[in-house]
Image (cartoon, grey):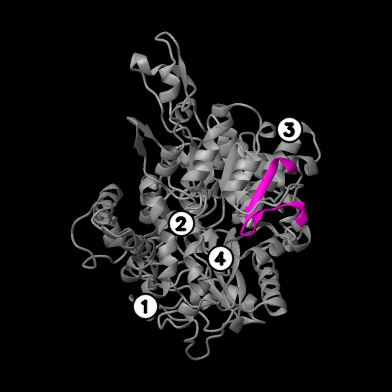
Amino acid sequence: MLSLNRSGFLRCDEKPGLLVSQRRRMPLAPAGVRCAARGGGELNGRGITVDNTVKELRGEAEPVLEPKSAGGVVEDAHGEDGDVEEQFIMPWTVSVASGYSLLRNPQHNKGLAFNEKERDAHYLRGLLPPACVTQELQEKKIMHNLRQYQVPLQRYVSMMDLQERNEKLFYKLLIDHVEELLPIVYTPTVGEACQKYGSIFGHPQGLYISLNERGKILEVLRNWPERNIQVIVVTDGERILGLGDLGCQGMGIPVGKLALYTALGGLRPSACLPVTIDVGTNNEQLLKDEFYIGLRRRRATGQEYAELMHEFMTAVKQRYGEKVLIQFEDFANHNAFELLAKYRKTHLVFNDDIQGTASVVLAGLFAALNIVGGTLAEHSFLFLGAGEAGTGIAELIAREMSKQTKAPLEETRKKIWMVDSKGLIVSSRKESLQHFKKPWAHDHEPVGNLLDAVKAIKPTVLIGSSGVGRTFTKEVVEAMATFNEKPIILALSNPTTQSECSAEEAYTWSKVNLVILVATCPISAVIRDFSWGSIFCLKTGLPHSQGRAIFASGSPFDPVEYDEKIFVPGQANNAYIFPGFGLGLVISGATRVHDDMLLAASEALAQQVTQENLDKGLIYPPFSNIRKISAHIAANVAAKAYELGLASRLPCPKDLVKYAESCMYNPVYRSYR
């Protein structure tokens, strides 16, 4: 074991004298000593605990972590704080982590929460002010500081700084204040962060794989310090939310998604890897921006693009094995469908834009049926937007209808219509359509715009996935309200500025004018209040004429007060699904993703919607219960994996919900001794 001094590490490329970097297999000491640079690569402080060589030489005990338990969760189920498995390491890379280095290690830094005993044991005296505080007080202070910022992007930058400084405090904060902080680390603020990523870029997060790394992607993966990766979120930045091509600056999306995998789904941070594939950008503004951090060239396409992606997929499987989940994120339509189709039979892959969005929307529809009544097959659906999100949602709805009615998939698809930039998708356009739109081309005369399509199709459910803001106009919403007692309107495009309509607009424009009806209403007569299905009469002074829409959006909207009633808009946020879905795949050791797993996730989410939620017009449960929700989703997904024979972790646990909860990462501080 080597040490230059108590304030630094020996870098792997600074080999003195006759030191040889020959690899040999050796078990790591439990908890206290860990490899400083696993699998090659420079030391970055993420895989290091405390290796107190000085005390070892004095014959004193090594520092050992004492896990704490909180909330009934079994700690360290996946070895977050202790590595006992054998790994390839460099013998000379196990180095002294002094107090100074410990304070700069985000995995183990506790800041002022180091107690007196720990400060003595790990050379922290003088490196911290004398005050010792609790994690709860640290949390309170950070939230106080965050609330002083008026600009959401400032809060985003502050949270990212905290993540790189004190990982456990970051996740504790996000878990305990998820409803307040989710819009900061995820949509809508993450969209602005990606647009300005070059300007706010500080500490690099994740792996950047560009065309410059062709032929050596496996070597690049080995530079990442963590060896046991369970989930990779990868983007090429071509279609970031509804903001278009942001190139290399799309890294904010994988980073944000994986933060939610940990906070909401309980996967340990060290098992998550964000990746950006940089093949250039066609965004002229970015190419001219002096602060742009990516390749300054036009996007690679065709064979050049396909070969780079294939090398990446092959290298990931070689490096991390069969069971690593690869989540495709914000790829453009033409690549998203092709990549999913190409690799779903050979890799454990999941496209959140196609499959995750579909699953969360289907869950919302399950819940909405408890308000409006009927079955899926008794409703008709009209989509604005026929890209990966829209067609993914449509396909899952059609599959669920087919499952319920035993009707052929081709028949259930006929209940679903789509409008793209050229109007209603009909059979006469079939020859010119992209392949993923063709299943939705039905027999009908051409219709040129959304309003006319609404009037012609008379859907009960209107779903927006166009990425174009304010396309659900007053006329469109009013048309939906003329032939639906309770129109279901889902404006799913992100961020908020790209939403097809706002919550206030949906509630206001879907009202019903009861004046004419009341003029002929006897005192004893009644009039149906179209908002909630109750019976009222204006002449008695009882409630009347309120917004009737059942509304949900992709990004959050504030509650709306209308006609002396508070409407709480639902959020059809993918964050309900993908963290629990990924956890279910991991705990079952699934080797492939099956569509039935998506249906299982939808059913689990819908089951978490209570009657109290429905009474408020909510078709999704509150995010305050998201860890519990994720555990139930994980259990359903895992159960389906075992049922389909796609699980490799045998035998199946008796209680999958409890098992999922026991596997969740808990960011409570541990004690060091």
Q: Earlier in the sequence, mark 3 or mark 4?
A: 4
Residue 345 location (% of width, % of height): 76, 58
List the single residue furthest toward the top.
524
**Three-letter amino acid code at disc 3?**
Gln
Crowd around label 3: few <14 · some 14–19 · many ≥20 (10 Å): few
User: Which residue is found at the position 40% from the left and 47% from the top?
Assistant: 175
Residue 515 location (% of width, % of height): 40, 25
Q: Quadrant of residue 62?
A: bottom left
Count numbered badges in the picture. Answer: 4
Crowd around label 2: few <14 · some 14–19 · many ≥20 (10 Å): many
What is the distance, in whole Å, between disc 2 and disc 3 at their CAs?
A: 34 Å
**Three-letter amino acid code at disc 4?**
Arg
Which residue is identified by label 2? 495
- Nearer mark to the viewer, of 2 and 1: 2
Label 3–label 1 contact, CB within 8 A:
no
What is the distance, in whole Å, between disc 2 and disc 4 at their CAs?
A: 12 Å
The residue tagged with tag 2: helix, strand or loop? loop
Which labelled disc corresponds to residue 404?
3
Which labelled disc corresponds to residue 629?
none
Residues drawn in magenta = 414-428
Which residue is identified by label 4? 239
What is the distance, in whole Å, between disc 3 and disc 4 at their CAs?
A: 34 Å
**Three-letter amino acid code at disc 1?**
Gly
Q: Earlier in the sequence, mark 2 or mark 3?
A: 3
Residue 198 visible in the displayed image: yes
Q: Does the segment drawn in magenta span residue 265?
A: no
Residue 669 visible in the displayed image: no
